[in-house]
Image (spheres, rainbow, N blue to C red):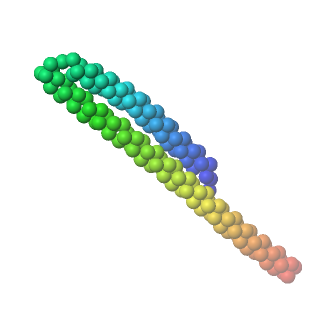
Amino acid sequence: VSTSGYDHQSAVIIKQLQQKLEASQLQYEAIERQLRSEVESWKTKSQAIASIQQSSNQDQLDVNNQQLLQSKRMISQLETEVNKLKDDAIIQTLRHTDEIKYLNEKHATALEEAANTKALEIQDIETRHTQAISALKRIHNDEIVSI
């Protein structure tokens, strides 16, 4: 039983999973940078709104307060989304790690089974060989006796 095909297949699957993991992490980092940029933008807008409030009349102040609250809500939503992306990346990393571990265990089991099968096949060959030699000896002895 040959395991070289299985070795190659496992190596390919493991490499693909590692590439997916790296791609997921890069994607996560890009999204996190974008969200952080948006958070900073909203913070800047919030600060601008806060400074405008000091110089505006009451009506303008009410509008600005609404915008400030909206900005704070948006910041909170974006921070929640960043945390969710972090959690998703961690979960995905754990899944890939578990999958790689499973494939390694499966590969080790297949190698062990192949070694056991090989040992049994060798033992069967040796038994057949011994039986064939015994049969030939009997035939040879019978021929000697008949002479």
Numbered circles on residues, count: 0
Q: Nearer the viewer, residue 60 or 30?
A: 60
Is 104 on the left or on the right of 133, as rendered? left
Residue at 24%, 34% in the rendered image: 73
Percent of width and height locating residue 74: 26, 32
Question: Dividing the image into 4 quarters, which one contains the C terminus?
Answer: bottom right
Percent of width and height locating residue 35: 36, 30
Percent of width and height locating residue 115: 65, 61
Residue at 26%, 24% in the rendered image: 50
From this view, report whether residue 22 is shown above or below residue 99.
above
Percent of width and height locating residue 90: 43, 45
Q: Nearer the viewer, residue 2 or 31?
A: 31
Q: Nearer the viewer, residue 41 or 34?
A: 41
Q: Quadrant of residue 125?
A: bottom right
Specify the farthest residue to the left: 59
Q: Quadrant of residue 114?
A: bottom right
Residue 16 in view, yes or no: no
From this view, report whether residue 145 is shown above or below residue 79.
below
Residue 71 in view, yes or no: yes
Residue at 79%, 78% in the rendered image: 138
From this view, report whether residue 106 is shown above or below residue 130.
above
Q: Quadrant of residue 49?
A: top left
Residue at 40%, 41% in the rendered image: 86
Specify the farthest residue to the bottom: 145
Is 134 on the left or on the right of 11, as rendered? right
From this view, report whether residue 119 is shown above or below residue 83.
below
Is 77 on the left or on the right of 10, as rendered? left
Question: Dividing the image into 4 quarters, which one contains the N terminus?
Answer: bottom right
